[in-house]
Image (tube, grey):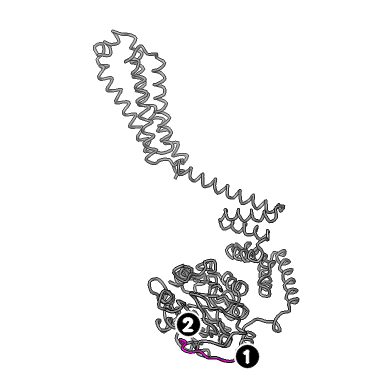
Amino acid sequence: MGRRLGIIVGANSYLDPAFRPLQYAENDARALAQWLVNTKGGNWAPSDVQHVQGAYATRELVESLITQTCMHVAGPSDLVFVYFAGHAFLDETSGQGYLALANTHYQQPSTGLHLPSLAQQCMGSSRASHIVFILDCFQTGRAWSMQRSSPYDSKPLLGPTILNALQQVGNRLICCSCRGNELASESGVKNLGSLAYQMIVGLCGPVIDPTSKQITLQRLHAYLYNSLGEQQRPQLFGQEHTPLVLVGDMPTLISPQHSGPLSPAFSPGVSEAQPAQSVSTGSLATQASRYATATAQISPTKSGKLALAEAEQQSNMLLSQARHLIQMQKPGEAFNCIEKVLQIDPTNIDALILKGQLLGTFNRYEEALYVVELVLQFDPQNALVWSMRAALLTNTGQNQAALQAIERSLELDPNNPETYAIKTSIMDHIATLQSQGNSQRLTITNKRGGPRSFFIGAGIQFLGLATGVVGAALPILQPKLPIAAALVLQSLGLALLCVNAARGSYLHGFARLLFTLFTSALAAIILGVVAILEGVNKIGTGRIYLTVKGNPTLLVPFLFLGLWLALAAALPLLLALGGFIGGLVLGVRRKKR
């Protein structure tokens, strides 16, 4: 049973303003990827579907994903499915087609994905049984209008070389749709582009074969061709020699060189395909000849193929050159050398490791991680690659996964001091993050100035006032109690009032100063009420005079009561005012915010 390998790419926004922002491209890519891996949808293995969108959809990453999947990952019975939603343009000088990624510049076509080169490298040399590209593109640039044969023609994007090769090679297909151009804007349904919406609608039911429960590209194309208007109508180029099954049981396939020439009766020329209605049969010898000729057209070769020894020698030379360029502080040129090595030998471990290291130095961590994961598929016992993975995961904030990776590296090579240094660095980083998190939580927990803090301060203020009043009145009400107990209560109450008033006004400002003014006024009112009730103003005849005259020992307690209430009214207010001014001058409350 073969695998279905998907690469789904969508980009709405671009660095170059020459590419107008799109509305639905990323939604289309996301929706299709989700449908493919959904158990009630395509039921593809999630690990076999790569979804890239937005700013991550760079030319380097997308080209690497497609190339590595087609050239190495895909096996003889596998299907490779590539969906691209975004801008496409033609080089105004050469007229060749390019896919625009997030970091593409229109005036610099080399920053885009060169479609003829991609087709030559991936379609011509891949072992996959089927490869299909679905290009849902907005046609950007003036060159389109000079090469179109119809308002929404997509053939200029492919060019005659690809079209002629696809006509001869079986099971290599490209399906194009016009998302928009200078004549027509992007259109959508329910927040999806028209093609993606109809595609998902069809995949959910109308396209399913009622007998086999399979969904084939042939049935999907026929449905879309009849469901969409002229602008989005899919233009299919290439021939199916065996059914391309998107969903359902995949047929047992044999290699194209030995398969029969069964193919849907699409248009034999380079014009867009109509829904197939019949099949034709030819001789095996003729089919093998056609396949060999087309493969020669579509595959990059050097006198047919590089001899193994020559290829290895050239790879080693390029790797040595790349290492020298790295030492000369020329990483860009080194990267180009490494790419040349990988074109010769996509599974060259040394080249892939160097590529991952360079991508990491360029801060392109996601691309570097992809390369590292690819190397681990070839060589899971490589301690250096596990260390690279740990460092990259740390840089992307995945600290626990990084710790697991570095532990794996130490299992494979326990005597490497650099690996221990990386582990120490990761653990320090985790500890720092935890410390910062605890500090933030502590700051939040101890955040001052809220209602809870205010009511706690008010409670302390009332407690201090009550404690002091009780301590001052105790010798009058209970003369037999030790005077020390009264003094302790008075001192404690006054201390609570003063400290709380000063601290609260210093840290929290005017609200606490205002509350201190209230408690001071309350102490003054108590003092006034006691003085009036005891007849202090009636010298010689007031009740307090008569009481003291009858019991002279009460004179001192009465004096302490009056003195304490006077202090409680004045001293906390003065300290609170000082604290308020001090906090204002030092900017304490501004820092707290």
Residue 345, placed above or below residue 587: below
Report x, y in % for residue 267: 50, 90
Residue 336 among magenta residues: no
- Determine the main secondary structure of the stretch shown in magenta: loop
Region rendered in magenta: 274-285
Secondary structure category for the residue under label 1: helix
Q: Nearer the viewer, residue 322 or 34?
A: 34
Disc 2 target residue: 218
The image shows residue 88 at horizontal and vertical percentages of 51, 78
Picture quarter with the C terminus: top left
Q: Residue at the spot x=44%, y=39% of the render?
A: 584
Query: Earlier along the polypeptide chain: callout 1 or callout 2?
Result: 2
Instruction: Name the residue type under label 1.
Output: Ala
Front-lying residue, 330 or 306? 306
* Residue 363 spot, x, y in % from top left: 60, 62
Q: Secondary structure at mark 2?
A: helix
Q: Is residue 574 above or below residue 439?
A: above
Residue 100, percent across and down? 53, 75
**In terms of depth relative to the viewer, which is nearer, 294 or 450?**
294
Packing grade of label 2 (10 A; few <14, some 14-19, many >=20) is many
Left or right, 62 with reference to 330 = left
Measured in 3D between alpha carbons, the distance from the residue under mark 1 to the one under mark 2, in whole angstroms, is 26 Å
> Looking at the image, can residue 98 be seen?
yes
Instruction: Please state if 542 lies on the left or on the right of 140 as rendered.
Output: left
Q: Which numbered dot is residue 528?
A: none
Q: Residue 285's mark?
A: 1
Instruction: Say which quadrant the N terminus sits in.
Output: bottom right
Q: Is residue 261 left or right of residue 201?
A: right
- Residue type at numbered disc 2: Gln
Q: Compared to 155, does 35 lie above or below?
A: above
In the rendered image, residue 284 lying in the magenta stretch gets the answer: yes
